Image (tube, rainbow, N blue to C red):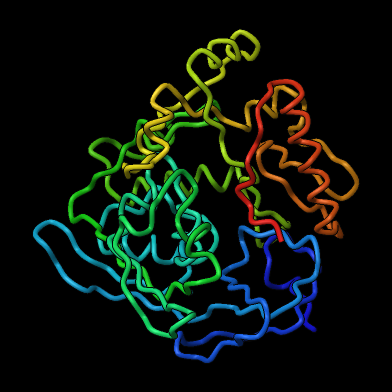
Amino acid sequence: MIDLFPYNTLQVHAQAKNFIELNSPDQLLPTDEPLLFLGGGANILFTKDFPGTVAKINFSGIKVIKEIDSDVLVEAAAGQNWHDLVMWSVNHNLSGLENMALIPGTVGAAVVGNIAAYGQNQGDVVNSVRVLDLSTNKAVNLSHQDCRFFYRDSAFKHEFKDKLLIISVTYRLSKKAHFDTAYHSRYESLEKILTQFATPPYTIQQVANAVIKIRTVKMPDWTKIGTAGSFFKNPFVSRQRLIELQSQIKELQFYPTEKMLYPHPDDPIFKRTDQVKIPTGRLLDELGWLGKKIGNVSTFEKHALVIVNLGGATGAEIYEYSSLMRADIKKNFDIDLEYEVHII
């Protein structure tokens, strides 16, 4: 048994029956018990012990595969630190990842959760994913379409779950800047931050620096306090429901869903054309959850969507706290919040 406290950013204690450091995708894996792959542990909550093997993915590395006109194909290993990859791309003047700077975790986890920030989505730049089929022990390549990216979601959370190990991800990055500085929320805008230290046309480095500055202010330092970042997804509501909510909540913003949807024959885009995304944090603010403490658990003082472990909280206590948040949102706004954090 091994304590998983050092391997999850929410800093909770949980035991794993077995634990291995996966330094190469060629390492043999157990086949006779449950298996959990762990990257940086930045998007997971252990509410109980894990009855099988936890495999910590350590293999990393970044390399240029091919240059195609104005694009460059860059391959990053699944265990590669995500922020380090972003800064590598920025330092090589390659655009496509800069708005997702300072998000904790690894490349493999970024693909699984289709992470996004300030208008950029993981799924927008993924070209292909190399995986190990655990049933055959053979490596295969998946196309962008195979991954079935959706808002904070992918096939790796569903049909591929527990069946494939992500080995590496190949990104199509651009030699020309393609960022959007117009993203704006109730709390901040990239354009506003950028104007404090730069003038248009902005460079990729300047945009990344602006994102880092915003995240440093509005998000807790996960190396110093237990957190998993945003705990819930932002919900989609109909435009009519938006109007109703705006009559209740002052300055309730909304965002289009198009960039979070990828067309497949059975993609939810065909059912959500009349919907918009609204910020969960604003709903929680309205109900007084900003900085609200219950025992050793709280939301961050500057962002109600971010749950923090004040020290010594168990996974079960954090989950109970999040359940109270969900129940409050359901009671007052009739919205069922979906977890962004993986609950074990």
Residue sitting at the far left: 69
Residue 69 versus residue 267 in the image, above or below: below
Query: In the image, what residue occupies the spot 44% across and 85% down?
Result: 137
Apparent side of residue 244 relative to residue 102 in the rendered image (left or right): right
Q: Toward which corner of the image does residue 331 lie, by quadrant?
A: top right
Horizontal and vertical percent position of residue 336: 66, 33
Horizontal and vertical percent position of residue 309: 78, 53
The quadrant of the picture occupied by the N terminus is bottom right
Query: In the image, what residue occupies the spot 65% across and 11% down?
Result: 248
Residue 341 versus residue 24 in the image, above or below: above
Apparent side of residue 104 relative to residue 207 in the rendered image (left or right): right
Horizontal and vertical percent position of residue 201: 23, 38
The quadrant of the picture occupied by the C terminus is bottom right
Q: Nearer the viewer, residue 190 or 141?
A: 141
Q: Nearer the viewer, residue 114 or 105?
A: 114
Q: How many marks?
A: 0
Residue sitting at the far top: 247
Query: In the image, what residue occupies the spot 27% across and 53% down?
Result: 95
Residue 306 versus residue 237 in the image, above or below: below
Apparent side of residue 56 relative to residue 13 in the rendered image (left or right): left
Query: In the image, what residue occupies the spot 33% across and 39% down?
Result: 198
Q: Toward which corner of the image does residue 40 lie, by quadrant?
A: bottom right
